[in-house]
């Protein structure tokens, strides 16, 4: 009888753990972020063939984000929140498609890797150190056919489409094992910290819903 009770207890715990895991599993969502500006420049960085300082003027204070089917999420966040949350300087720096309105046909879509952002909200100026890429990351595949190699020194209105690949949702919420305080910016831009629980045990994860 003792062995039977022990076996039943193990089965019940495993079943509860499986159910909880399924209920609390965060949805996998890929987001695309869009920055807009009224004008910009590419300034070559000395000693490099494909690195430039991208300087954007008249930058919108908000970054729009959206996802494709089946989620079809959309919203906006501040430039500061986006730049602090997306992640720079890691193995996967943000990739971006720079789509220049009314640009020359051979230089109106440039795909780059973004690094070292510098943002001044008071002047609406934003700059990055960028490396021009030969291929587009999966999240930017829609721009592959339009990719250009000519880099314009100056350009007008522009939209910068940035993929979410470098951002990895981290632990959020208050709990064991040194988790951060609930509500801390441990989640990617466009996602937020959600609390769930089972039998009184709280669980926190980042969700886009």
Image: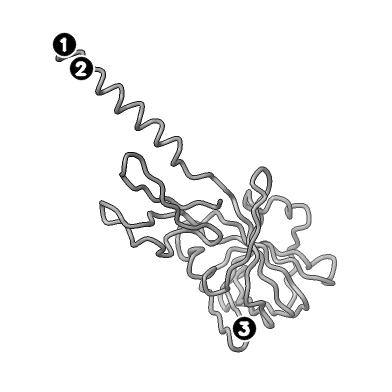
Work out whether residue 115 or residue 19 is closer to the camera in this orientation and state it: 19
Q: Residues within 10 Å of mark 1 (few under 14, many from 20)?
A: few
Position of residue 38 relative to residue 111, above or below, is: below
Work out whether residue 174 or residue 128 is closer to the camera in this orientation and state it: 174
Q: Which residue is mark 1?
A: 1
Q: Secondary structure at mark 2?
A: helix
Identify the residue at horizontal 70%, vertical 76% (top origin).
37
Kindly indicate the quadrant of the structure image that contains residue 174.
bottom left
Kindly indicate the quadrant of the structure image that contains residue 123.
bottom right
Q: Secondary structure at mark 1?
A: loop
How far across and how far down the image is residue 127, in percent? 59, 78
**Reading the chain from its start, which is encountered first: label 1 or label 3?**
1
- Numbered tag placed on residue 125 in the rendering: 3
The answer to whether the residues at label 1 and label 2 have Cβ atoms under 8 Å apart is yes
Q: Residues within 10 Å of mark 3 (few under 14, many from 20)?
A: some
Position of residue 40 relative to residue 167, above or below, is: below
For the N terminus, give its image quadrant: top left
Work out whether residue 161 or residue 136 is closer to the camera in this orientation and state it: 161
The answer to whether the residues at label 1 and label 3 have Cβ atoms under 8 Å apart is no
Q: Which residue is mark 2?
A: 5
**Reading the chain from its start, which is encountered first: label 3 or label 2?**
2
Identify the residue at horizontal 43%, vertical 64% (top origin).
185
Taking 99 as reference, is 128 left or right?
left
How far across and how far down the image is residue 169, in percent? 45, 54
- Front: mark 1 or 3: 1
């Amino acid at each position: 009888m003792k062995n039977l009770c022990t076996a039943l207890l193990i089965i019940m715990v495993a079943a509860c753990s499986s159910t909880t895991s399924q209920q609390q599993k965060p949805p996998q969502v890929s987001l695309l972020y869009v920055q807009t500006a009224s004008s910009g420049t590419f300034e070559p960085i000395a000693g490099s063939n494909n690195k430039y300082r991208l300087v954007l003027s008249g930058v919108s204070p908000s970054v729009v984000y959206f996802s494709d089917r089946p989620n079809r999420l959309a919203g906006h966040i501040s430039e500061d929140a986006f730049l602090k949350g997306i992640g720079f300087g890691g193995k996967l720096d943000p990739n971006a498609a720079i789509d220049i309105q009314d640009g020359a046909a051979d230089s109106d879509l440039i795909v780059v890797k973004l690094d070292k952002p510098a943002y001044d909200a008071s002047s609406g100026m934003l700059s990055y150190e960028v490396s021009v890429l030969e291929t587009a990351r999966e999240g930017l595949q829609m721009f592959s056919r339009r990719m250009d190699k000519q880099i314009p020194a100056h350009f007008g209105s522009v939209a910068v489409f940035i993929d979410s690949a470098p951002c990895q949702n981290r632990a959020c919420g208050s709990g064991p094992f040194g988790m951060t305080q609930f509500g801390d910016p441990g989640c990617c831009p466009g996602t937020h910290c959600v609390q769930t629980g089972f039998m009184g045990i709280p669980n926190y994860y980042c969700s886009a819903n």
